[in-house]
Image (cartoon, rainbow, N blue to C red):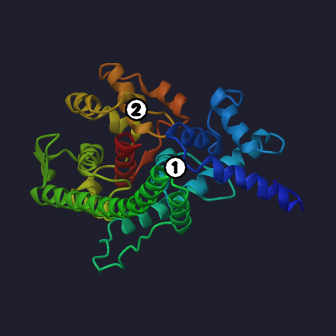
Amino acid sequence: MSFGEDEGHAAKRFETVRALVKDPTTATLEVLIRLAFRLKIQTSAPEVAEVRSKLTGELRPPGDEELAMLAASALACAMDSDSDNSSLAATMVATASCGGLRSLAQPIDLVGMSKSVTRKLAEVSRRRPSLEPTRALVTSLDKTEVAAAETQVSEGNLGGALQTVVNSINKALAAVSRRQTAVETQFQKYTKLQDEELDILWWLQSGHCADLQNDFPDVPAEHRPLAIARELATLTKVLPGPTALQSLFLRAGVPEAPQRSIEVAVQGMPKSWLDMVLCDVDKDKISPVTTPILFALNRRKELDGDEGWAPPWSKLTSLDQGVELEPLCLAEMAYREFLLVQFG
């Protein structure tokens, strides 16, 4: 697809793309993922029409193929931003790919980008804030407002002059307050991450899976990918999670599990574990697009643990129910999904 030699046309399209993901909702990101991955979605649906309208701007409405490309561009912009939404977008793209079970026919490697962004954010978020003394914030009254107050005094309007000075002082105090709030927020986040690392360390040292009431070696190998992923997710405080995720799974014995399909892995979990896990999950956040493993768990629970849920699940998710995943891949995808329903 090409915009020809009209650079202005491409620039205007890109403006609409950036505006769309400036502060996107989870619902908007999911629509973009459906379009970018070319999953089943009615192009005339209200949510798609809304995205198409926002991407139109001053130009003609994009066609379906152009809309899919623009959706991929929007996801790339969302992941590449400096806002907190970049972690959410990267996590949703990763879970939508489901360990490579869903292909992405786009000129941009969104899945590879999501891995890179997740790794970078995990490292950056865990850096200790600088403890070096910073330059004191210099505050002063606005010269224009001071001059206005002096004029009001000369005119005998003492009340107006006093109000002008008060407004100017409030602006200076607000600047100090914003800076103090930013510093406190930064250290609160870092403290939360330190608590997360400490909790995970104690969990790893204890070597005990509380959900299945067994030490790691005694947890059946086939149960480990989903059970360990869920338990580790409950200890995580901030997206996108720790940097050493694979090492944590390794220490918990996840690689010893056999290679399994999502269907077999989900059907093999104890029903008591299934009921406990889904009891804590907001069902409204479970999606066949971005949380296919949790969607499978929920479908099985709806049938009271019986078989028969897999064919409809496969149809709704557009995933092959028989394709097997490596245990580390299955665990990571499940972990990302649990984080998504916790923080998304």
214 and 201: which is toward the camera: 201
Rate crowding at label 1 as few (under 14), some (14 to 19) or many (20 or more) other CA atoms within 10 Å: many
Q: Secondary structure at mark 2?
A: helix
Quadrant in the picture for residue 243? bottom left
Image coords of residue 4 (percent x, y): 89, 59
Residue position marked by numbered label 1 in the rendering:
93
Q: Amino acid at mark 1?
A: Val
Image coords of residue 255 (percent x, y): 29, 57
Left or right of 292, for residue 125: left
* Residue 207 visible in the shown view: yes
Left or right of 117, for residue 2: right
Spatial distance from mark 1 to mark 2, Cα to Cα?
18 Å
Q: Is residue 33 above or below residue 14?
A: above
Residue lying at 27% horizontally and 44% vertically, measured from the top left: 230
* Residue 112 visible in the shown view: no
Q: Is residue 88 above or below residue 112?
A: above
Q: Amino acid at mark 2?
A: Ala
Image coords of residue 154 (percent x, y): 53, 61
Left or right of 140, for residue 12: right
- Residue 296 marker: 2
304 and 188: which is toward the camera: 188
Q: Is residue 271 above or below residue 51?
A: above
Left or right of 305, for residue 26: right
Residue furthest right as drawn: 5
Residue lying at 49% horizontally and 24% vertically, measured from the top left: 312
Q: Secondary structure at mark 1?
A: helix
